[in-house]
Image (tube, rainbow, N blue to C red):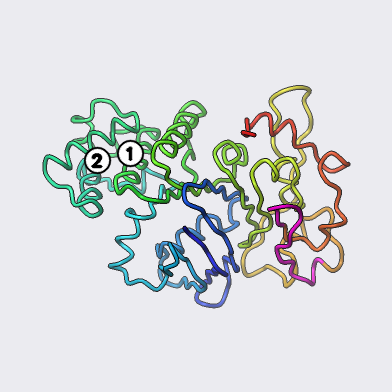
């Protein structure tokens, strides 16, 4: 249903920030995008929906049912955004309009994407608030975002996303800055809505545990590229790229004996500082001399699992001297 082909985002047409992304999303599928901050996860999907500011340019294709939406006019894109593809932003308190009532914002989406007005829009707005767990709907519709808690604002954002009855929901760090209890409630809400509507999901997060619990497949991003992609269980039990292995090794294990976490040294490089070879090479414990010169492409590592590593066939698998992902997998409660 949705496919990115060699999708690139550049700053002023010179510095590539997202570098040749190839991804696909099936109808009703849940795809997780993980990686550290600064890897290009959010930027990819903001660019795909033409939500970037001036100075940023894109190339490649974003195909929605075979139609390249990057070539659409702004008027046509307003029908896509919210109608076919909805986005939950990282910070709901800044994404919501502070000078408009919650009801006004909900009814605007209902009018633009479903043609509802008057009493119909009022009833549907109340239904949406109830669906996302906000009680006392008539009073809440008259309030402003500053009168809501962080968790309630996130629920409003989900209601706004659902108002247009989209085919795809892009959830960008939907539980950022929420406490653990509210985080679990929001994730359960997204899971229930997907089950009821059949909506496809793209979940952007730096938390592999959250993604592993909700998604069918995971794509790992580093420095603007996809470095590994696989079915959730395969990626968590048999990570093939050293970066994916490093992310899993850095996860705390809440059961059994305590163990020291193994952090990934260094930081994600700035886009202008990325060398010609593998961007992860300066931080990679398995890097060889060729890694700094040659850019690896995604190659088949196992059935339906691809990784971008020049030393792919030489690296040990989890359980044979690298990392043990099983405790983290149990913690995430990944379905079979």
In percent of the image, x 44 and y 39: which residue is there? 194
Q: How far apart are marks 2 and 1 (CA)?
A: 8 Å
Q: Classify mark 1: residues with Cα within 10 Å, few (<14), some (14-19) or many (20+).
A: many
Whether residues under marks 2 and 1 lie with C-beta atoms below 8 angstroms apart, the answer is yes
- Residue that numbered label 2 is attached to: 102
Region in magenta: 291-306
**From the viewer's perspective, is residue 77 above or below residue 240?**
below
The residue nearer to you, when weighing 328 against 85, is 85
Residue 77 sits in quarter: bottom left
* Quadrant, the C terminus: top right
Q: What element carries label 1?
A: helix
In percent of the image, x 17 and y 48: which residue is there? 116
- Residue that numbered label 1 is attached to: 156
Q: Where residue 241 sits: x, y (%)?
A: 75, 53
The residue nearer to you, when weighing 206 against 189, is 189
Residue 256 sits in quarter: top right
Q: Give yes or no for residue 299 being in the magenta stretch.
A: yes
Q: Where residue 83 sits: x, y (%)?
A: 32, 54
Q: Where residue 222 sits: x, y (%)?
A: 65, 57
């Amino acid at each position: 249903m949705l496919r990115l082909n060699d999708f690139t985002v550049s700053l002023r047409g010179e510095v590539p920030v997202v570098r040749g992304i190839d991804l696909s999303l099936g109808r009703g599928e849940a795809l997780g995008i993980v990686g550290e901050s600064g890897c290009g996860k959010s930027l990819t999907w903001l660019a795909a929906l033409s939500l970037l500011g001036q100075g940023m340019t894109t190339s490649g294709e974003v195909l929605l049912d075979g139609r390249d939406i990057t070539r659409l006019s702004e008027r046509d894109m307003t029908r896509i955004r919210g109608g076919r593809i909805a986005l939950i932003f990282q910070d709901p308190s800044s994404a919501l309009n502070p000078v408009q009532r919650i009801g006004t914002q909900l009814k605007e989406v209902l009018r633009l994407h479903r043609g509802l007005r008057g009493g119909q829009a009022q009833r549907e707005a109340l239904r949406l608030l109830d669906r996302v767990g906000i009680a006392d709907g008539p009073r809440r519709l008259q309030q402003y975002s500053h009168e809501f808690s962080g968790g309630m604002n996130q629920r409003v954002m989900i209601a706004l996303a659902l108002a247009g009855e989209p085919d795809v929901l892009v959830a960008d760090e939907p539980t950022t800055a929420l406490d653990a209890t509210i985080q679990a409630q929001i994730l359960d809400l997204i899971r229930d809505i997907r089950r009821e509507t059949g909506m496809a999901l793209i979940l952007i997060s730096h938390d592999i545990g959250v993604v592993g619990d909700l998604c069918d497949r995971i794509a790992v991003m580093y420095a603007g590229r996809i470095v590994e992609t696989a079915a959730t269980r395969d990626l968590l039990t048999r990570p093939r790229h050293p970066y994916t292995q490093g992310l899993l090794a850095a996860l705390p294990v809440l059961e059994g004996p305590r163990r020291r976490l193994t952090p990934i040294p260094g930081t994600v490089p700035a886009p202008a500082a990325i060398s010609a070879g593998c961007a992860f090479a300066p931080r990679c414990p398995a890097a060889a001399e060729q890694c700094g010169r040659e850019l690896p492409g995604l190659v088949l590592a196992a059935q339906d699992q691809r990784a971008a590593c020049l030393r792919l066939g030489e690296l040990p698998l989890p359980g044979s001297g690298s990392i043990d992902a099983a405790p983290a997998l149990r913690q995430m409660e990944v379905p079979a």
